[in-house]
């Protein structure tokens, strides 16, 4: 159980929750979060947006009943956190770009905080949020509003790419990667629907070159060339 320090709305349907506790989350990991007993049954998987001496932060989008309930919670309320879970991002080598689409920007903030060099490309559909926070990290930040953020990135300029966003964006990234010189190691973080978060239910099953894997324990970060999307 963790007490909520704050839960602020940063855009239409987008919130940042700060929950108390000492965690040692790696970049790209997630927690299963719930603030209720019984219905809705499932906890919600939320990526680690940031972590500080007081606790962990989640940047999340209201996408259903569970996240709607989370968005109504206030400072002083308790949430149940299971985690940190998943493999997270590997160590970035060489010139690195982090590319996020929509709420997929969430895990990139914490990743960027730990990198000496990174170019950030953030894609939004209707409203820009948390721009000031991303810029405060000191890395170059390119914002795309209403367009295709991937179009702004030349994969051959980089050695490592971390990409997180909706599935069509990740598929487009796979194609772009296949058409590039192959210089960059391209990693995608899958926002698969998860139920248990600990490898017990197969809800997050994802096709891979060597059979099926579980996004919650084998991912959520995979090499782009490894997964079938
Ligand atoms: Fe249950 Fe991954 S969410 S196995």
Image (tube, helix red, strand yellow):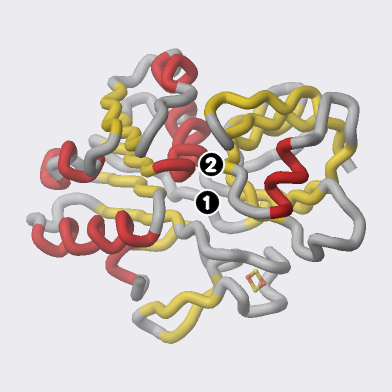
Q: CA distance from mark 1 to mark 2?
A: 5 Å
Picture disc at residue 22: none
Quarter holding the C terminus? bottom left
Tally of numbered discs: 2
Quarter holding the N terminus? top right
Query: Which residue corresponds to the image point at 20% horizontal and 50% vertical from the top-left?
Result: 184
Which quadrant of the figure shows ligand 1?
bottom right
Q: Which residue is mark 1?
A: 88
Q: Is residue 103 above or below residue 115?
A: below
Residue 107 in picture, x, y percent from top left: 50, 41
Residue 48 in picture, x, y percent from top left: 60, 40
Residue 204 left/right relative to 168: right
Of pointers 1 and 2, the one earlier in the residue sequence: 2
Residue 181 left/right relative to 131: left
Q: Is residue 104 above or below residue 115?
A: below
Residue 171 in picture, x, y percent from top left: 28, 63
Q: Is residue 110 above or below residue 226?
A: above
Query: Which residue corresponds to the image point at 63% horizontal and 26% vertical from the top-left?
Result: 9
Crowding at mark 2 (Cα within 10 Å: few <14, some 14-19, many 20+)? many
Q: Is residue 29 above or below residue 111?
A: below
Q: Which residue is mark 2?
A: 27
For the residue pair 223 and 45, the one nearer the viewer reads as 45
Mark 2 falls on what kind of element?
loop
Residue 119 in picture, x, y percent from top left: 28, 29
Query: Which residue corresponds to the image point at 79% horizontal and 47% vertical from the top-left?
Result: 81
Crowding at mark 1 (Cα within 10 Å: few <14, some 14-19, many 20+)? many
Marks 1,2: beta carbons within 8 A: yes
Residue 52 left/right relative to 59: right
Query: Which residue corresponds to the image point at 34% horizontal and 71% vertical from the top-left?
Result: 226
């Amino acid at each position: 159980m963790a007490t909520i320090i704050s839960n602020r709305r940063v855009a239409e349907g987008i919130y940042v929750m700060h929950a108390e506790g000492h965690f040692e989350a790696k970049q790209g990991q997630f927690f299963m979060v719930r603030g209720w007993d019984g219905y809705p049954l499932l906890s919600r998987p939320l990526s680690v947006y940031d972590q500080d001496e007081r606790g962990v932060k989640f940047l999340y989008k209201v996408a259903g009943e569970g996240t709607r309930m989370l968005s109504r919670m206030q400072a002083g309320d308790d949430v149940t956190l299971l985690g940190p879970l998943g493999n997270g991002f590997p160590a970035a080598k060489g010139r690195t770009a982090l590319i996020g689409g929509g709420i997929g920007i969430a895990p990139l903030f914490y990743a960027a905080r730990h990198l000496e060099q990174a170019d950030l490309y953030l894609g939004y559909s209707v409203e820009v949020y948390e721009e000031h926070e991303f810029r405060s990290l000191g890395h170059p930040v390119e914002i795309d509003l209403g367009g295709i953020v991937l179009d702004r990135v030349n994969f051959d300029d980089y050695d490592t790419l971390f990409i997180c966003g909706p599935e069509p964006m990740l598929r487009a990234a796979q194609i772009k990667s296949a058409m590039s010189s192959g210089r960059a190691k391209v990693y995608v973080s899958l926002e698969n629907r998860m139920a248990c978060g600990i490898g017990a239910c197969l809800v997050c099953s994802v096709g891979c070159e060597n059979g099926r894997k579980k996004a919650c324990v084998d991912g959520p970060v995979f090499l782009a060339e490894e997964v079938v999307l």
